Amino acid sequence: MSTTTPTASATPIGAPAPTGAAGPTGAAAPSRRARWRVSATYPEPPEGWTGVSRLESFIDAMIDMGQTGQVFGEHGIGKTATFFSYLPKAYPEAELVFVPAANLTPDDLLANAPVRDARTGELVLRQLVMSQLRPGKPFVLLIDDSLQAGATIQSQLMQIACNWTLGEFDLRALGCIGVFLTDNESLAETAARRSDLAVLDRMVTIRLTANDTSWRHELAAKYRDWNLREVFTTWSTLSPALRELLSPRTIDHILANAREGFPLSWGLPLVNGERLRLVETRADGRRGKDRTAEILDRIAAAVGADNPATIPDPVRAVVRAALRNRWSVLLQGPPGCGKTELVRETVREGLGGREPLYFSMPVTNVEDLCAPIPTTDGALENLLAGPFLGPEPKAIVWDEYNRPKDKAAFAKLMEITQEWSLAGRRIENLRAQIAVQNPPYHLGRKLLVARNNIAQATRFTASLMVAPGDIPANEWLIAKYGAVAETVLEWWKHDIDEDGRAWITKRTIERLIKLHERGLPLEMGTVYLGDGEYAPVPLTALIDRLNERPVTGLREIAEDIDAWEARLRKAAAASSEGTNDTDVVHQVLANAELSQLKKHPKVVARLVALLPPKLRSTYLVGASSEVQRFWIETFASIPRG
């Protein structure tokens, strides 16, 4: 499952060369299993529990036999996680060398390089092997996503799988006691199949389902105080197609979001910009019933958690949760709404003022992250970029995540977001990863973003679809630009429709403010669509407001509070529902930013006291905790009587 990360026993790049050879006989018999981990789900071991899963038994057998093991199974069932959790317990004397094949380049495993010969002093050409394969002790080699490697890498992997050699190096002499290749056979996730009989004849292959790993026991131990039996029952009763969509990894993410009080749907991945739906398929192949809400509600009820439709200030809430819990999260929202700036600001606060590690994917090369270089001891060591090093707390922001410069750079991200390592080396004190991207379509237009598959999409613990209203950029605009920003925001809230507000992003609002301050035509600040056409949003009302046309806002009401108080008293006497004057004041208060409300607290209290009680309660719905606190204090100040 994606929340399982490499243990400290995984071999770091650059480890010292071995001091002695170790062959297959170096593989000790598996140590005794750890005692049963008691949880609310399993206070006692379940009936039939043998201590190991089918995959764990396969690992033992392949190491004992000295055979290459090929492991196929659906995404998200815990294949890779089993190696990371089981091997340190069963073979504590051995290292796990994890090699993510999807992001290998031809020179990562093996390369020729000029090295000065110790005997003659001359430069000679020597073959160098990646330093991970020289840990100096017995090791198990795990090649993950093996079918996703390129053609050149596949040739190298063939030699490893067939002979446990690489170039001129004998992996057994270097200490290798086991070789495993893992992947999902589905062509939806890989671009190739392994069909060469010369290769297939050298391997023992197992095909797994979710029932062949210990994911239930792992989740039960992780959420120790929750009884997950009903969750597991719900999953077991689903059709095979739905169980594949709702993989154990995704169940883990759903439970993680439930524990934080977030909408459980955030645990469902975004596949090509759309939230995964748990939809039945009919016998004739047509789309059947959408069971997403039903299944998520059943999971929430099973663990006694809420399943809210949304929460206040969702972006900051999920970034703070990511920093607390060491999550990878994905935020998808329209361009120009302020996602990236809010993420960077929130991360900065969570790291005590330290800036996040920021990478814009359209300009990020593989070499910006890591690159293999020869070392003096005759190995290839992957150098990590400087920002990844050091013990200080770190968080990474992957901006424009679905606009990678090339496939190689994107492939590197797969390892980092899934395993929290880079080129097999763990990034020390990495607290969170936040990927930010645009949707494939916005305002009826296609954006130039890359596609993904479900295996890639399920790498994130929480995946949010961010709306402009989820980004509190209005306060920032007011703080920076003052009264002009208030005027433009009043126009944005009151004078244009929902489609118009979608075209006028917070980034566009800032441009309009700057153009007004320079006395330039405002139309230039809207989105240019080509052939002399700008975004279809009328600017006449904004120009009138900026030219001080009489308007009604909180500032104007405060300047004439006695008259407005009298109008509200008259409205209350005329009808318990109020009149048009009541509606005007209500809309002004509902649309006001917190900073505007705090400028006129006494005025707000006088107005609210004369509004119908049902209108007052709406100010708390969906508001941030700071806004709710303001209104609760305001309501408390209203005289009883």
Image: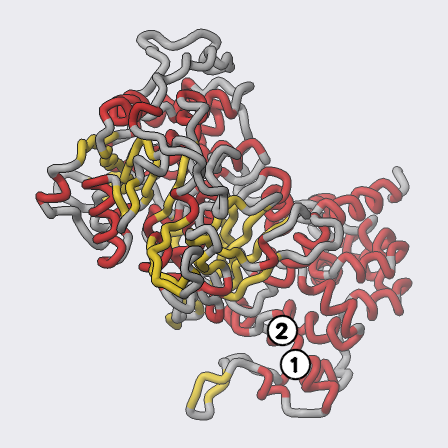
Q: In this orientation, does residue 24 appear? A: yes
The quarter of the picture where the C terminus appears is top right
Q: Residues within 10 Å of mark 2 (few under 14, many from 20)?
A: some
Determine the image quadrant of residue 402. Answer: bottom left
* Residue closest to the eye, 144 or 342: 144
Residue shown at 74%/61% (left/top)?
592
SS category of the residue bearing label 2: loop
Residue under circle 2? Answer: 495
SS category of the residue bearing label 1: helix
Determine the image quadrant of residue 93. Answer: top left
Question: What amino acid does circle 2 point to?
Answer: Asp
Residue under circle 1? Answer: 512
The quarter of the picture where the N terminus appears is top left
Question: What amino acid does circle 1 point to?
Answer: Leu
Total marks shown come to 2
Q: Position of residue 500 (x, y in %)?
A: 54, 73
Q: Is residue 48 above or below residue 565?
A: above
Q: CA distance from mark 1 to mark 2?
A: 15 Å
Q: Which mark is residue 472?
A: none
Residue shown at 44%/70% (left/top)?
443
* Residue closest to the eye, 426 or 138: 138
Residue shown at 59%/61% (left/top)?
358
Q: Position of residue 191 (x, y in %)?
A: 22, 54
Q: In this orientation, does residue 311 appear? A: no
**For the view shown, which residue lies furthest in the front direction?**
120
* Residue closest to the eye, 512 or 182: 182
